[in-house]
Amino acid sequence: MQARDWAGVGELLSDDVVVEWPVSGEWIVGRDNYVGVNAEYPEGWSIRVLRIVASGEEVVSEVEVPHESLGVHRVASFWTVRSGRVVTGREYWSELGSDPSPEWRAGLVERL
């Protein structure tokens, strides 16, 4: 992704991969659509991998995606991999600070 090697990204996906984005209420169905969504994302971004955890066919990643004008996003992604290709995914995209802390818990938390 960081190298913008879209053909290489496509090689890691099954033809009929399905990726769910619950926060925005979208499904991305098919390799070409998933690659296309990422290739069309407005330039000015980079990726910082925070962690990857894998067990059998399941892989979880947490990454930070700072963007020059769109802010800093964090992404928690849950992948199912079979025969070396991603077959399903669920990604939770959130912009840092976009979920305001409610007043009722102000005395119980500390700001990052």
Image (spheres, helix red, strand yellow):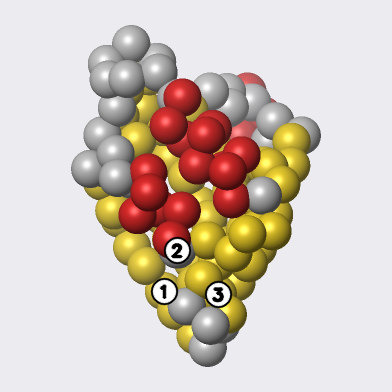
Q: Residue 25 in the image: state x and y as whole percent.
A: 76, 34
Residue identifier under label 2: 12
**Residue lying at 58% horizontally and 80% vertically, measured from the top left:** 82
Residue identifier under label 3: 81
Question: In the figure, is residue 19 to the left or right of 58?
Answer: right
**Residue lying at 52% horizontally and 34% vertically, measured from the top left:** 36
Q: Of tags 1 and 3, which is closer to the observer?
A: 3
Asked if 79 appears above or below 22 in the picture, the reply is: below
Question: Looking at the image, can residue 60 be seen?
Answer: yes
Question: In the figure, is residue 60 to the left or right of 47?
Answer: right
User: Toward which corner of the image does residue 89 lie, by quadrant?
Assistant: bottom right
Q: Nearer the viewer, residue 59 or 28?
A: 28
Q: Earlier in the sequence, mark 2 or mark 3?
A: 2
Q: Nearer the viewer, residue 103 or 57?
A: 57
Looking at the rendered image, the quarter that the C terminus falls into is top left
Q: Of tags 2 and 3, which is closer to the observer?
A: 2
Q: Residue 31 in the image: state x and y as whole percent.
A: 59, 50
Question: In the figure, is residue 7 to the left or right of 78?
Answer: left
Looking at the rendered structure, the kind of residue marked 1 is Val
- Categorize mark 1 by other alpha carbons within 10 Å: few (<14), some (14-19), many (20+): few
> Marks 2 and 3, how far apart in space?
9 Å
Q: Residue 1 in the image: state x and y as whole percent.
A: 33, 45
Task: Find residue 53 and name its label.
Answer: 1
Looking at the rendered structure, the kind of residue marked 2 is Leu
Q: Of tags 1 and 2, which is closer to the observer?
A: 2
Question: In the figure, is residue 38 to the left or right of 44?
Answer: right
Q: Nearer the viewer, residue 8 or 69?
A: 8
Q: Nearer the viewer, residue 50 or 111?
A: 50
**Residue lying at 44% horizontally and 25% vertically, measured from the top left:** 41
Task: Find residue 109 and name its label.
Answer: none
Furthest residue to the bottom? 56
